[in-house]
Image (cartoon, coloured by chain):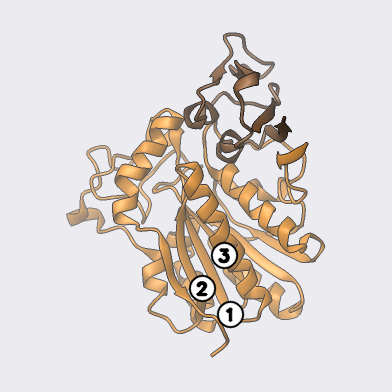
Chain colours: A orange, B brown
């Protein structure tokens, strides 16, 4: 009998606090599986952000430091520079990374810090009740855009990966999604590459993962994944945007 | 030589989101009519004999409550 699927060791036994159907849990698990497969659990430091994933330290079975809102890349920079032999990653949502933390992520990427960033994009501020985020789609209804995002007043969503791809610092930039099993497998490959890039000393790595937010989108979990596929994928295409094979 | 799977769902930790049921290619997962101690309708395998052990349910489970094994039946 072969085990096809079991809980990874890099996850603690604590049940996730996330809402039913929220794909944060899938992304947590993929990161943990990659940590197990690379054999780096005892050598990894995570930096948790602010948002729904603020409690990530309860779930990742590695050392974790909690950062102030948006500052995870700055904290990770400090940890990695003091302890260069550790694998350091941040786990941030779009309200954290693409809004209050924009300066930190842009400059960490521009400096080519040898850290890995997991960027979970669910197109709204999940923890605080589904307000408009920089990543909210044009026309998308949120609690602070009840008539839909009006781009003449609220501007346009930011494609973080494409924006960071204009910099010379990043070694690996990719966008994945987890709206079906095939995409989950692809997302894991990208996450693995983002850790390998750091271990090979190539530079900054970031994977954006499109994630569902059934509660704040007002959809059932399965409908939320369909909404993601139909609405988010056209605006946020998946794929690898930068992939250095050796240091420059 | 057919392949057979064995899927174990932790009913107490399941939040009844139904993603496993939606992606099961055999359509053999559904939500139980009864609730668990946290008030959710947990997912159950309705026809364990038909499971191939493909683990798509487990890959989509946001709460990592599904374990899958595969046995090769003669």
Numbered disc 1: secondary structure: loop
Q: Is residue A5 visible?
A: no
Q: Which mark is residue B62?
A: none
Q: Residue at x 65, y 46 (%)?
A: A55
Q: Quadrant of residue A102?
A: bottom left
Of callouts 1 and 2, which one flags the residue occurring earlier in the amino acid sequence?
2
Q: Disc number at residue A203?
A: 1
Would you say the residues marked 1 and 2 are in contact, meaning their CB atoms lie under 8 Å apart? yes
Between the C-alphas of marks 3 and 1, the distance is 11 Å
How many residues crowd mark 2 within 10 Å: few (<14), some (14–19), many (20+)? many
> Mark 3: few, some, or many residues within 10 Å (few <14, many ≥20)?
many
Instruction: Estimate the x, y position of residue A224 in percent, counting from the top left.
Output: 40, 35
**What residue appears at the point 37 percent right and 71 percent down from the top-left corner?**
A163
Residue that extends furthest to the right in the rendered view of this protein: A42
The reply to whether the C-beta atoms of the residues labelled 3 and 1 are less than 8 Å apart is no
In the image, residue A6 sits, relative to residue B43, either above or below, namely below
Question: Residue A117, labelled with which disc?
Answer: 3
User: For mark 2, what is the residue?
Assistant: A172
- Quick check: can you spot residue A247? yes
Q: Position of residue A109 (x, y in %)?
A: 51, 76
Secondary structure of the residue carrying tag 3 is strand
Q: Mark 3 belongs to which subunit?
A: A
Tell me where residue A47 appears, x and y as whole percent: 66, 61
Indicate whether A112 appears above or below A135: below
Q: Give the structural element (helix, strand or loop) at label 2.
A: strand
Q: Report how far apart the C-alphas of labels 1 and 2 lie in the structure.
A: 8 Å
Q: Residue at x 78, y 36 (%)?
A: A1
The lab-note entry on whether marks 3 and 1 share a chain reads yes
Circle 2 chain = A
- Between A143 and A232, which is closer to the camera in this rendering? A232
Which residue is the extreme one toward the bottom? A248
């Amino acid at each position: 009998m072969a085990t096809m699927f079991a809980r990874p060791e890099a996850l603690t036994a604590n049940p996730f606090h996330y809402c039913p159907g929220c794909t944060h849990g899938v992304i947590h698990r993929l990161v943990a599986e990659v940590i197990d497969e690379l054999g780096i659990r005892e050598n990894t430091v995570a930096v948790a952000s602010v948002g729904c994933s603020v409690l990530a330290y309860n779930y990742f079975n590695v050392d974790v430091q909690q950062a102030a809102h948006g500052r995870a890349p700055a904290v990770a920079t400090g940890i990695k520079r003091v302890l260069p032999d550790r694998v350091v990653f941040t786990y941030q949502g779009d309200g954290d990374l693409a809004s209050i933390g924009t300066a930190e992520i842009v400059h960490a990427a521009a400096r080519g810090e040898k850290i890995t960033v997991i960027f979970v994009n669910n197109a709204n501020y999940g923890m605080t009740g589904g307000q408009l985020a920089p990543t909210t789609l044009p026309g998308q209804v949120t609690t602070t855009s009840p008539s839909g995002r009006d781009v003449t007043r609220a501007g346009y969503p930011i494609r973080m990966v494409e924006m960071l791809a204009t910099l010379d610092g990043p070694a690996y930039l990719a966008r994945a999604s987890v709206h079906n099993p095939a995409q989950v497998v692809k997302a894991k490959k990208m996450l693995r590459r983002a850790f390998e890039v750091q271990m090979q000393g190539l530079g900054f790595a970031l994977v954006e993962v499109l994630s569902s937010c059934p509660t704040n989108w007002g959809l059932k979990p399965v409908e939320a994944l369909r909404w993601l596929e139909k609405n988010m994928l056209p605006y946020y295409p998946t794929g690898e945007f930068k992939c250095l094979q050796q240091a420059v | 030589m057919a392949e057979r799977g064995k899927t174990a769902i932790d009913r107490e930790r399941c939040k009844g989101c139904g993603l496993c049921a939606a992606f099961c290619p055999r359509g053999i997962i559904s939500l139980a009519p009864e609730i668990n101690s946290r008030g959710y309708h947990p997912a159950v395998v309705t026809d364990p004999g038909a499971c191939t052990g493909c683990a798509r349910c487990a890959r989509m489970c946001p709460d990592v409550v599904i374990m899958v094994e595969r046995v090769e039946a003669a």
